Image (cartoon, rainbow, N blue to C red):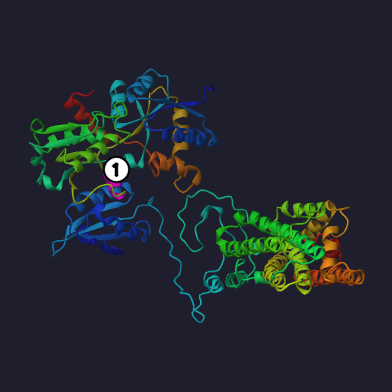
Amino acid sequence: MSDHTIFIGAVAYDPKVVTIWEGIRDYFREAGVPVDFALFSNYERQVETLIEGRIDIAWNTPLAHVRVQKRTGGRSVSLAMRDTDCDFRAKIVVRRDAGIQSLRDIEGRTLAVGSRDSTQARILPLHFLRQEGVDLSRVSLLPFDTDLGKHGDTGTSELDVLAALHSGAAGAGAVGDLVWVNEQAAGRVDPSKVEVLWTTPGFDHCMFDALDTLPPEKADAFRRALFAMRWDDPRHRRILELEGLRQWVPPRDEGYRSLRAALDEQGLW
Amino acid sequence: MVKEVAAAVAVDGGALPLGGGLLAVVPPAVALLEPGGVLAVLSSAPSVREDLPSWCRVERCGYLGHEEMPDGRDRHLIEKGPSSPARREAEPARGLPLREGRLLAADVLAAYPMPERASPQSGFAPRGASVEPGGPPYPFSLLERDHIAPPEVGSLYDQAVSAQWDATRDIPWDRVKRLPAALESAVGQIMTFLAENELSALYVPAKFLPRIHPAYAEVAMFLATQLADEARHIDVFLKRARIAGGSLGTSSVTTSRSLLSLLELEDFTEAAFLLSVLGEGTFLDLLRFVEEHAPDEATAELVRRARADESRHVHFGLAHVRHALAQDASLYGRLEAAVRRRAATLHGVGGVPAPLQDALTVLAARGTEARAVARGHEAFRTLLETMHEDRMRRLRHAGFTAEQAQVLSDLHTPNFM
């Protein structure tokens, strides 16, 4: 393999990930930037492999991103994110017949939450509820620990939360805004049974991470080709649709402050 | 602060929650905006305060906030983002004219004309639809109006649709009687030849249909009527051969070679010229001959109906070639070369296939009595002359000179099609 090849890691949370990365590899090759990729079954292994220097770049969830930053003492390099990764929010959704009018009403009730490594369906909703003064020791959690290691990418645990709300197994639940909007748009939410109560503050989502040992010319080439992808170009559009974005944007770090605080507070580092 | 923003469009969402109907109202209104345009959404549903900002994030619109109006409803403001789907360009509303209660494709075409060129990226979007950019390219290769769509295609399509008939009921099949053996056999041979040639007339245009860009749908729609015509002709010819206990005749190598050379054509205009102008044009005379000498009313009726359909195909082929020739003078040379290439591949195949020639002679003679056969042979010779003269006339009509027409007609296949 040529030294110029940029070696990227991604987690295979769905069969479409193969299509996405083969598409990105072909697109980068056409753009004159040779890349190859390795697929991991979980983010913990991907982070270890990046730290060991055996891949150049990792496509990370927010949880994996802040862990890379912590492990490298803040010296890791953030390269790019999706437009959709900015200002992500979580929703507290309730059964209409549960009589929950305010966040404090969740105390004494059952709150359905997603996987313990899901930023949007568990870690941050619990953090923000505590900030809002909810006494979590008085809340009965109904957790759906599915697809552990995938950090909530599959969305399975969020669908489990919505199902628990529809069935009455929980009076309240936490899901990401993307799943909430998309499930409503698809007509899979019954508005006579379930409605939104509250929206958390915004936080940022996935990030391309590298070590500071990544040669600057590789980082520049990677960013240049990535940012040249266009939604209106049919050659790029399919990849962007599958990856769930309209355009790649430069990184920003302030959107991960709440996640770091949540990990401190919940002892999840 | 929200009040300062002037909304271009407002929609009333009533008490609809986002997932309970509001999404049927808001996205179409956003689609009417230019990027940066603002939509006001009136709502009395408290959940919309939580859900509309999230929908905006997912759809790349800006949520500018909400204010409470004096009647207690919320007025939310949404700004269409730069990367949200482009504004739908609505086609101009023109309405369509009725002619004595009839709505014609020709009038639709006149109101919504075909573009000179079409983009493969618009796929199967009907002409006039607003096409979201970024769609995949389609493998259409006929992308230029003046190479495929004569101006009269709309009215030809209208005529074709109203002239459709039923091969099951519209032929007086009950009038067919078994003929003397030689004449029955001649009819079987002629019907075999007609069906074989019509099969090629079904397959050859079908090959070009998926290459036509849907912006020129009227051309594809006309071809669809042509294919339905050919299917019906194949059906009636084979029925006539067998109805009274007769059987099919011979398929000759001359016919087979001639039709393969049509099927192998890769250029739509060349195919229209060789198949419709020269081939089907020549067939008109053949069908008239069979009608004139038909042994019964059913046979006369079915070839008469087939000829009426074929004359439409010839008309379309002539219109296509004449229009294309008027746009592109180099086409004369290409069409002549196509005829010469085809003649070269058929070199040495001899004259009209012998079984057909014999059958036409027996048909015109009404049997095999010697003096009648002499008359039949004379009728056949006259048919060949008529075919040549009519081909010349059509070639002149298409835009060829008398000399060019003479050469091209002489080079035409002895198989007629």
Left or right of A147, for residue B68: left
Quadrant of residue B181 within the rendered picture: bottom right
Q: x, y (%) of residue B62? A: 30, 51
Left or right of A19, for residue B16: left
Dominant secondary structure (helix, strand or loop) of the stretch shown in magenta: helix
Three-letter residue code for mark 1: Leu
Residue that appears at 44% across and 62% down: B89
Judging by the rendered image, the residue that carries numbered circle 1 is A178
Provide the secondary structure element on which disc 1 rests: helix
Residue B371 visible in this rendered orientation of the protein: yes
Left or right of B259, for residue A194: left
Query: From the viewer's perspective, is residue A122 above or below residue B4?
Result: above
Q: Please, which chain is the residue tagged with disc 1 on?
A: A
User: Of B213 and B208, which appears nearest the observer?
Assistant: B208
Residue that appears at 55% across and 59% down: B214
Q: x, y (%) of residue A66? A: 28, 28
Quadrant of residue B76 within the rendered picture: bottom left
Look at the image and say whether residue A184 sits in the magenta stretch: yes
User: Of A195 and A233, which appears nearest the observer?
Assistant: A195
Q: x, y (%) of residue B326? A: 71, 68
Local packing at callout 1 (Cα closer than 10 Å; few below 14, some 14-19, many 20+) is: many
User: Of B219 and A151, which appears nearest the observer?
Assistant: B219
Query: From the viewer's perspective, is residue B270 above or below residue B290?
Result: above
User: Of B359 and B263, which appears nearest the observer?
Assistant: B359
Q: Which residues are magenta?
A: A180-185
Q: x, y (%) of residue B143? A: 61, 57
Left or right of A20, for residue B310: right
